[in-house]
Amino acid sequence: MPKPTILVVDDESFFRQVFSDILADDGRYHIETAASGMAALQRLEETNFDLILADLMMPEVTGLDLLRQTRNLDPPPEVILATSHASVETAVRALKNGARDYLLKPCTPDQLKHVVRTCLEQRQLLNENSLLQDQIRLYQKGQTLATQLDVSILLHDSMQALRQEIGEARGCSFFIEKDRLTLTGHSPDCQEASARVLCDALAPRSLEMDRVTLLESDSLEPLHEGPQDLRSIWLLPLTAEEQFRGGIILFNPVGANLPSCLPEKNLGFLADQIRLGFRNACQYEGARGLIYSDDLTGLYNYRYLQVALNQEIRRAERYGLEFSVIFIDLDMFKNINDRHGHIAGSDLLREVAAQLKTCLREADLLFRYGGDEFTALLSETSSDGAVIVAERFRKTIEEIVFLTDSGETCRITATVGFATYPVHARTQMELIDLADKAMYQGKMERNVTRSASEVSID
């Protein structure tokens, strides 16, 4: 019988060496190491491991990120997470996300050997019964989906899980919020534009469905820019709070049909878990929206700006991308409050927020920074693109003609500043500070746009 294979993942060479030496001591395992979560993902593309022993807190790709990625492998390895900063919350989170066990560093050799041995013995027992293994694999996959609280990730991972069960299929998924359809994922063999056309076409049909439905392409209106060679469709409509909110679509590969005998029992089980996870995720998104939303304008607030910037910096570092932050400050807004009252001022802020949203793409985010200041986060946008959007903001506000309750009209202008990561700054606070300084430098003239490149250095 071949030795179980273990991948030790830790960004600290000390723990990689210690764990490897302890586990290799009795010669029962084949041990490999990786110095980061990213390196581990690359190694997992090349070989299968029985067990991954990973540090919970690593830069870029954390232990939890690695855990989530391994859930899509077939078969997935067992995962034990280790950390120097343990708490009940982190332990529960690790186990809920599918970790087999949890270790506090430093641990004794006996503790490490016991946890690893127990984990691999359980895995061996499962491997001895292929039917039981398949059922547990399906159960674990379903549990992972049912407990995922990020709607976009849930829909994307659910689509991938369903495709794996069918075998050969293309797929896409979508989410509907405030009557706006967002494409949340598509398989590599389906272009984004054609996936969006298919989702737009099937969303109205999904309103009439309460269960998984198989459709033939000839029952649809011709989709001139839809997926190539569309023959048959498997559609899972998703609801939350008794409202249709999204769906997952699987359809035949180019040049072939969907399998004639679909694994209906497995697909049905996963569909039930996906529905449960979707309802929970929508409720979580709603609760999180209350925390991260500005009461007056409905935009994201300063608290969520910090979260979004942190995520965007990590993504930019990982993929070598640029992104930009724009600050918008209304000129002489106090005069509006003084002349027309605070109710009129609040109404004007809501109008400005609504108009600014029309200037952005789906991938961009808009925030009320505080008072009469707004902030926009433009993903994958260079300084050249940021100046165009910044000017669009300025002109849009300049063109607003606001009618007060007393019948008077008023106008307002705004001064705009922007900064680009990593061209102008490489940290979250520096980026905010430079965009803010660019805006305040423009305040000497008002109703202008300024780049962080133009900020005077004292």
Image (cartoon, rainbow, N blue to C red):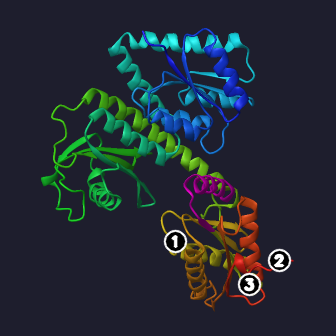
* Depth order, front residue of 219/436: 436
Give the amino acid at mark 3.
Gly
Q: Nearer the viewer, mark 3 or mark 1?
A: 3
Tag 2 residue:
457
Q: Which residue is mark 3?
A: 442
Residue 400 belongs to magenta span:
no
**Main secondary-structure element of the magenta-colored stretch:** helix
Percent position (x, y) of residue 416?
Answer: 67, 79
Specify start and end residues of the magenta stretch as a single range: 305-324
Where residue 415 sits: x, y (%)? 69, 82
Question: Mark 2 vs mark 1: which is more N-terminal?
Answer: 1
Horizontal placement of 174 versus 391: left or right? left
Establish if 438 lies above or below 173: below
Identity of the residue drawn at 48% across and 13% down: 3
Above or below 414: residue 236: above
Residue occupying the point 62% across, 91% down: 409
In this rendering, would 42 be left or right of 94?
Answer: left
Q: Position of residue 99 (x, y in %)?
A: 56, 26
User: Amino acid under label 1?
Assistant: Leu
